[in-house]
Image: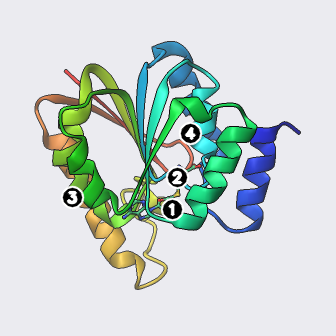
Amino acid sequence: MDYLDEMEQYARERKIPVVLRDTREYLENICKTLQPKSILEIGMAIGYSGSCMLKQCDANICCLEISKPNIILAKQNFEKLGLQQRVEIIEGDCLKTLPTLLGRKFDLIFLDGPKGSYVDMVDYILPLLSEKGVWISDNVLFRGMVLDGKPITEPRFERTVAKMRDFISKINDNPKLETEILHIGDGVSCVRFK
Ligand SMILES: C[S@@+](CC[C@H](N)C(=O)[O-])C[C@H]1O[C@@H](n2cnc3c(N)ncnc32)[C@H](O)[C@@H]1O
């Protein structure tokens, strides 16, 4: 078992949500083929998906994360993997920290933060995406409840599902964007400029 697998196991045992295996492979393939120089990750948790991406390219990553305990763990993990020089962590609520990035550009953006706020972040994220960049978002199908007609299992999911539908409509309906919704993991969207 390598250190990335250990990180995954650590997260699963403690119920810290990290990307599923096929989502990890999808992100790794994008990094291998795109070879981004700059990555933005919104929702870093313990640095698992960030590390997986960094291992496939020589990019630097900027991570937005609200949880102090996760940030402590992520720093330890990046150090253990010798990746710390390539990582910038911005602590706080991404709805507040995202606007502070205006003027910067990222070749790859991975959105994996608060699921009910994706739609509210679109207008902050698009100006940060480089011309030939790729923007991936995780959990957009949210356990099949968003587009696949599975019943909403808990009342607390109702708002999240509605907001995720709004998110998908917003990126699909933007004429400047090419959008794919993929049945990978919990559902992944992939957005590029036309
Ligand atoms: C699904 S986890 C990220 C998993 C990570 N991308 C991975 O696969 O290794 C979501 C993360 O978003 C963080 N988060 C939730 N709300 C946030 C907010 N408003 N601003 C910044 N981070 C937030 C959580 O603390 C959590 O660590």
Cβ at disc 4 under 8 Å from ligand 1:
yes
Question: What is the CA distance from the residue labelled 2 to the residue labelled 3?
Answer: 20 Å
Give the amino acid at mark 3.
Asp
Q: Where does label 1 land, which residue?
A: 143
Point 51% across, 50% down: residue: 44
The residue lying toward the viewer, choosing from 153 and 63, is 63
Q: Please give left or right for residue 39 compared with residue 172 in the image.
A: right
Question: What is the CA distance from the residue labelled 2 to the residue labelled 1?
Answer: 6 Å
Q: Residue 1, percent across and down?
A: 89, 39
**Nearer the observer, disc 2 or disc 3?**
3
Label located before the other in sequence (2 or 1): 1
Classify 10 Å Cα crowding around label 1: few (below 14), some (14-19), many (20 and above).
Answer: some
Residue furthest out toward the front = 85
Q: Label 1's element?
A: helix
Q: Is residue 6 above or below residue 59?
A: below
Classify 10 Å Cα crowding around label 4: few (below 14), some (14-19), many (20 and above).
Answer: many
Q: Are marks 1 and 4 in contact (CB under 8 Å)?
A: no
Dot label at residue 123: none
Cβ at disc 3 under 8 Å from ligand 1:
no
The residue lying toward the viewer, choosing from 3 and 23, is 3
Q: Please give left or right for residue 146 compared with residue 44 in the image.
A: left
Question: What is the CA distance from the residue labelled 3 to the residue labelled 4?
Answer: 23 Å
Dot label at residue 50: 4
Label located before the other in sequence (1 or 4): 4
Give the amino acid at mark 1.
Arg
Q: Label 4's element?
A: helix
Residue furthest out toward the bottom = 155
Q: Where does label 2 land, which residue?
A: 186
